[in-house]
Amino acid sequence: MKSIQLSTIQPVQLCAGFDSKLIHSESMTWSFVHSKAGYTLPAHQHIHEQVTHIVRGDFELTVEGVPYLLRAGDLFIIPSNTVHSGKSITDCDIIDVFNPVREDYAKLSS
């Protein structure tokens, strides 16, 4: 078991306009994202199942070509190997949870 203070974690840039504080367990990665209004997350896919939770702001998530407007309190489950992208309509705080661990993100936060 482990206690973590989010305030002690240095953010890393995932891409322009998207900074994240990353936490990894044995089987999951948690990404606490702050994104700036108007910035876009390019289309991508990965083996990880992803749960996206919009904590603050408005975010347009496009999954398999279909846009979804997500607002504070909304969650979206993105299956493994599904093409998705996004755009911050406003400044946003987002929590993304991935299973299994995002090894690429683990390298960013080490």
Image (cartoon, rainbow, N blue to C red):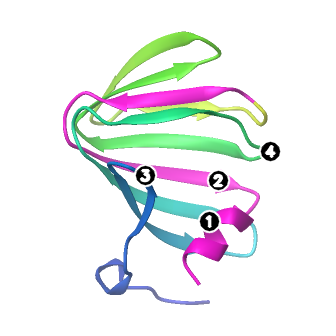
- Whether residue 79 sits left or right of residue 65 in the image: it is right
Distance, label 4 to label 2, CA atoms, is 9 Å
Look at mark 1 in the image and give the residue it sits on: 105
Q: Earlier in the sequence, mark 4 or mark 2?
A: 4
Q: Amino acid at mark 2?
A: Phe
Which numbered tag is attached to residue 47? 4
Distance, label 3 to label 4, CA atoms, is 18 Å
Identify the residue at image location x=25%, y=32%: 38
Distance, label 2 to label 3, CA atoms, is 10 Å
Q: Amino acid at mark 1?
A: Tyr
The residue range painted magenta reads 82-110
Residue 18: give x, y in percent of width and height: 37, 51
Q: Earlier in the sequence, mark 1 or mark 4?
A: 4
State the residue in front, 63 or 73: 63
Identify the residue at image location x=69%, y=61%: 102
Is residue 104 inside the magenta stretch? yes
Distance, label 1 to label 3, CA atoms, is 14 Å
Which numbered tag is attached to residue 95? 3
In this view, 53 is above or below 5? above
Look at mark 2 in the image and give the residue it sits on: 98
- Label 3 Cα crowd, 10 Å radius (few <14 / some 14-19 / many 20+): many
Q: Amino acid at mark 4?
A: Ile
Identify the residue at image location x=62%, y=64%: 29
In this view, 68 is above or below 26? above
Is there CB contact under 8 Å for labels 1 and 4? no
In this view, 108 is above or below 63? below
